[in-house]
Image: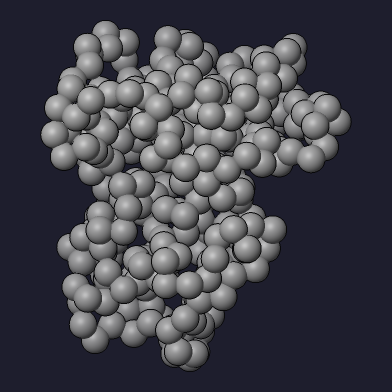
């Protein structure tokens, strides 16, 4: 992670705003399962131009309100990852100033896009800005780890390989902009159920892949696609068995003549298709929306 400078605290009463971009797993290889039950993985992640929006009003008492299409599913109680992240941080650094958070929840919930984790990371960035902390501050990083496995990689939102249980982060990758269509059939999937369907016993290690997990830093779009074509998402099969709509969404994407690659993200149910440019992605989104108007579909870029 890039070291962030310690900044002066934000002015009192100044409303702070952060984006919480969708996290897309371009590949996801499950490499084993620890004796304590946690699964090990290697995943190339990138962050989309679409996502949620989180604001912080330091004048109001600590709390959370939620609006937007995903508000009801996300919930605004103490179990929301935004407040959990803030409480983890304040427990490690007493005396920090907080405030009232408002989450505009645009991403579907339980969708394999790391939405809740990205929201939590945005909350930690807001707390860092408000209190003049750097993202390299040990309390920020510890709070991210304590909040959830995907929160650390979401802190600075740059493409990289994450490994282990999400706690091992490779340096950021300078990948070219990728143009994508994200499709969710509005079928929420519990991550635990998908991993359970993988059927990997505790203490088991899988044969290592001989394929590279990520393309070379600074490579072109064709090199990225060549590496991704040899990769996979090991959770796709168990997720399809729990939600046949995933297979349908993948088939629709793969039927589009301009789609270069289609795969599931995370533990599902969101799938993505990669296209050569933004116009092709926009055409792809329109085709999906016409075929399945009740589904959630967005054309975006991955950074």
Question: Which of the two residues, 59 or 293, is positioned nearer the viewer here?
Answer: 293
Task: Examine the image and state in which quarter residue 74 appears.
Answer: bottom right
Q: Would you say residue 151 is visible in this rendering?
A: yes
Closest to the observer, 12 or 94: 94
Give the color scheme: rainbow, by chain, secondary structure or one colour.
Answer: one colour
Image location (x, y in percent) of residue 87: 31, 73
Determine whether 28 is above or below 67 in the image.
above
Left or right: residue 36 compared with residue 221 = left
Quadrant in which residue 48 is drawn? top right
Q: Locate residue 98 relative to residue 1 in the image: left or right.
A: right
x, y percentage for residue 291? 83, 27
Relative height, residue 135 to residue 260 (above, below): below
The image shows residue 194 at horizontal and vertical percentages of 43, 32
Q: Nearer the viewer, residue 244 or 60?
A: 244
Q: Residue at x 18, y 22 (%)?
A: 204
Residue 225 lies, in percent from the top left, at 50, 15
The residue drawn where x is 71% and y is 41% is 296
Please count the marks in the image: 0
């Amino acid at each position: 992670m890039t070291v962030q400078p310690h900044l002066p605290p934000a002015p009192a009463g100044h409303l702070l705003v952060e984006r919480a971009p969708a996290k897309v797993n371009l590949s996801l290889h499950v490499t084993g399962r620890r004796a304590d039950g946690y699964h090990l993985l290697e995943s190339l992640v990138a962050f989309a131009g679409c996502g949620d929006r989180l604001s912080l009003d330091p004048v109001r008492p600590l709390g959370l309100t939620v609006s937007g299409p995903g508000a009801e599913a996300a919930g605004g109680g103490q179990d929301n990852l935004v407040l959990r992240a803030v409480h983890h941080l304040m427990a490690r650094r007493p005396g920090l100033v907080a405030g009232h958070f408002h989450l505009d929840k645009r991403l579907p919930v339980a969708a394999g896009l790391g939405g809740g984790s990205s929201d939590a990371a945005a909350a930690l960035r807001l707390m860092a800005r408000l209190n003049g902390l750097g993202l390299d501050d040990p309390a920020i990083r510890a709070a991210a780890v304590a909040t959830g496995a995907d929160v650390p990689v979401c802190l600075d939102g740059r493409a990289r390989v994450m490994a282990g249980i999400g706690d091992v982060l490779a340096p950021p990758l300078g990948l070219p902009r990728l143009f994508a269509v994200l499709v969710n059939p509005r079928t929420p999937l519990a991550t635990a159920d998908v991993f359970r369907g993988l059927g990997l016993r505790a203490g088991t290690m899988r044969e290592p892949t001989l394929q590279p997990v990520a393309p070379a830093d600074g490579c072109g779009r064709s090199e990225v696609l060549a590496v991704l074509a040899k990769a996979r998402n090991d959770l796709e099969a168990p997720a399809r068995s729990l939600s046949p709509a995933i297979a349908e969404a993948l088939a629709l994407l793969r039927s589009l003549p301009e789609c270069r690659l289609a795969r599931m993200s995370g533990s599902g149910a969101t799938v993505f298709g990669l296209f050569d440019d933004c116009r092709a992605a926009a055409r792809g989104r329109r085709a999906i929306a016409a075929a399945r108007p009740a589904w959630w579909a967005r054309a975006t870029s991955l950074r």
